[in-house]
Image (tube, coloured by chain):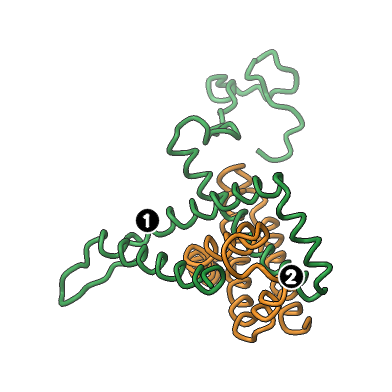
Chain colours: A green, B orange
Amino acid sequence: MKSQARIPTGRISDPGYPQASNPEYTRHHPRWYRRHMPIFWWLRKFAYTKFILRELTSQPVMYATLFLLGKVWVLSRGPEAYEIFVQWLSHPAFLAFHALVLVGLLFHTVTWLNLTPKALVLRVAGRKVPGWAIVGAHYGAWLGLSGVILWILAGR
Amino acid sequence: MRRARDPFFWGLFSAGGMLTALLLPALFLVAAITAPMGWFGMTGYEEWVALASHPVTRGGLLVVAFLAFFHAAHRFRYTLYDGLQLYHLDALISIVTYGVAAALTVLAAALLILVV
C-alpha cells in the first residue's frame, strides 16, 4: 500500500500495467480489506450512545475539579472577588450549565458504581460475594460520604 | 514502552474514577449551586475561606485533583481513540492528554501549597 503513485485499475489496457504471460495472475489488483465506520457510529444504537456519553463524563469531572480549584483561588483574592464570583454563579445561564454538569457527574457516579462488581471480585469464606452486595456497599459509601459533605458544607 | 506504562495509567484512571464518583457530585452541588444561591448553611465568605485554607482541605483537594485529571485524561484518550477512530494518532493523543493532566496537577499543587 505504500507510495502508490496510481492505483492500478486492473485493466489490461491500463498503460504501464505489467503484462504477464498469464494475465489471470496480474490483471486484478487485490482489494484491501478495510472497514469504514462513520464517525457518528455511536448514534445508531442507544447502547452505543450511552457508552459514548459515559465516556464523555470525563469532561464534567474535569470541569468540576477545575471549578473547585478555581473557587479556592477566588477565595484567596479576597471578599470582593468572591462577591463577583457568586454573582456570576447565580446567573441563570451559569445555573443551567452547572445543573447540566451535575447531571454529568451523577451519570459518571451511577455508571461507575454499577460496574464495580465487574472490577471487584470478592470472596468471603470461599464463596463469591454477589454483585448486588458489592454495588450496594458502594452506593452506601457514596450516600454516606455525600451526607457527610452536605452536612459539613451546607447542613449547619 | 507503551505497554509497560498502560497499567500505571489504568490504575490512576481507576482510583480517580472511584474518588470522583464518590465525592464530586456532593462537592460540586454545594460549591457551585447551593452556596452561591444562598441556600442552606455555609454561604458566607469567611466560612469558605476558613474551609479552603485548612490543610486537610488543601491536601485532600490536591489528591482529588491529581487523580481526577489523570482519570479524565485516560478516559478522554480512549474517547478520541474509539469515538473518533483516531488510531493512528494514539501516541500524540497520549502525550497531549497525560501532558495536560500533569501540567494541571503541577498548577493545582502550586495553588494549593503556595497561594494562601
Q: Foreground mark, 2 or 1?
A: 1
Categorize mark 1 by other alpha carbons within 10 Å: few (<14), some (14-19), many (20+).
some
- Residue bearing the label numbered 1: A114
Q: Within 10 Å of the Cα at label 2, are there few (<14), some (14-19), or many (20+) other Cα atoms? A: few
**As drawn, is A71 to the left or to the right of A57?**
right
- According to the picture, the residue beneath numbered tag 2 turns out to be B103
Can you say which quadrant of the picture contains the N terminus of chain A? top right
Q: Which amino acid lies under the numbered mark 2 shown in the image of this protein?
A: Ala
Q: CA distance from mark 2 to mark 1?
A: 31 Å
Which residue is nearer to you in this view: B1 or A42?
A42
Outermost residue, bottom side: B55
Of B41 and B70, the residue lying toward us? B41
Give residue A71's position: percent from left, percent from top: 71, 67
Q: What residue lies at 53% left-to-right and 73% top-to-bottom? A: A156
Write the residue at 50% across / 38% down.
Answer: A49
- At mark 2, the secondary structure is helix
